[in-house]
Amino acid sequence: MNPHFSPVALEKAYRLINHGPTVLVSARHDGVDNVMAAAWACALDFTPPKLTVVIDKNTRTRDLVEKSGRFLVQVPTVALAELTRAVGTTSLLDMPDKLERAGVAFFAVEGVDLPFVAGCSAWLACRVMPEPHIQATYDLFIGEVVGAWADDRVFRDGHWQFETAGPEWRSLHHIAGGHFYAIGAALDHDDFRSNRPKI
Amino acid sequence: MNPHFSPVALEKAYRLINHGPTVLVSARHDGVDNVMAAAWACALDFTPPKLTVVIDKNTRTRDLVEKSGRFLVQVPTVALAELTRAVGTTSLLDMPDKLERAGVAFFAVEGVDLPFVAGCSAWLACRVMPEPHIQATYDLFIGEVVGAWADDRVFRDGHWQFETAGPEWRSLHHIAGGHFYAIGAALDHDDFRSNRPKI
């Protein structure tokens, strides 16, 4: 077990995804584990924390989420860029060894029956808040976050530490077609420029 | 009028927010214009493009959006960090001169009756797809994107040009309490490390 895997207080869980990273969504049902990438995940509420995620009907993960009522949203890093691309562009439905090929290593967390992807920087365990209409119409799922953890090398004391963690810990932000940006420089209130648009 | 204000094809509109930037949401109704910041905005579909945004009941913008059925999602830049913080932490309800104090300059776009914030890098005009249950329960709004534009100094040919545009054009990604990160380095498929998690 990674000794840096640390609980995050639920009231601060939104901070793990507030900056809009591309995430990995994993789920488990009836002996099947899977994980997919999702750029369309977003915080929805602070307390209790909730989030939204779009899970397409043509994914294997969708079925696992609907049947188990649970899923895990996790924040991959620059070190996992190739894994993220791979699990986001292949499906267990037509590639049974998708996880092995992508190099996915799951680990277990006591008391949480979900597959945790090793090497991520943060993990949010969610239960589906059933909203059949938006699930069917928009592929949009609402999750209540019931557990949150982070790797304390990059998130601790309630804050991301991108400034001091190595560049391999940066979050990924997908645009299209395998083109990502890493998160960049910190910008605090004191640093703000006074520039005004010239238009 | 900013000569760099350029239309973006609707099928590529999702790319303007796919990397998870904090956005500005503006709206207009009955002679009142307003704008707020929102970290909780997310793409929802490609074609026709749709997005979600959380708009709290205690904002003036919420009322304008509900009454007009329209809103504008726009991507602020590092140069607008202080403006973004200001419009995200004050309300027109208790500060009537909020927009002037924050230095917001609106511009008009022919045929689109919405207030466009000058200096942003991208703009997405949306019509509300009425979903009363999730609006009331989660403050969650679904918008169909009916028009998209970008400043061609930072987004052109369907792609963000953060690598070559000046640092003041970078998108903002809010964590909490006025602490932002700017978007960072590009990471293309060829650049991916082969690092695997050591756990």
Image: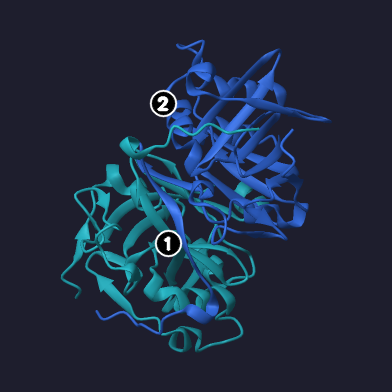
Chain colours: A cyan, B blue
Q: Which residue is mark 2?
A: B89
Counting from the top left corner in percent of width and height, residue A80 is at: 40, 75
Residue at the image point whose x is 52% and y is 69% from the top: A61
Q: Which residue is mark 1?
A: A71
Check the image and name the residue furthest to the left: A3
Residue at the image point whose x is 47% and y is 89% from the top: A101
Query: Which corner quadrant holds the C terminus of chain B?
Result: bottom left
Query: Which corner quadrant holds the N terminus of chain B?
Result: top right
Counting from the top left corner in percent of width and height, residue B172 is at: 47, 46
Per the image, label 1 sits on a secondary structure element best described as strand
**Pointer 2 indicates a residue of which chain?**
B
Q: Quadrant of residue B117?
A: top right
Looking at the image, residue B126 sits to the left or right of residue A19; the answer is right
Q: Quadrant of residue A69?
A: bottom left
Relative height, residue A2 to residue B117 (above, below): below
Counting from the top left corner in percent of width and height, residue B148 is at: 73, 45
Asked if one can make out residue B65 in the rendered structure from this viewpoint, the answer is: no
Q: Nearer the viewer, residue B53 or A32?
A: B53
Looking at the image, residue A47 sits to the left or right of residue A128; the answer is left
Counting from the top left corner in percent of width and height, residue B39 is at: 47, 41
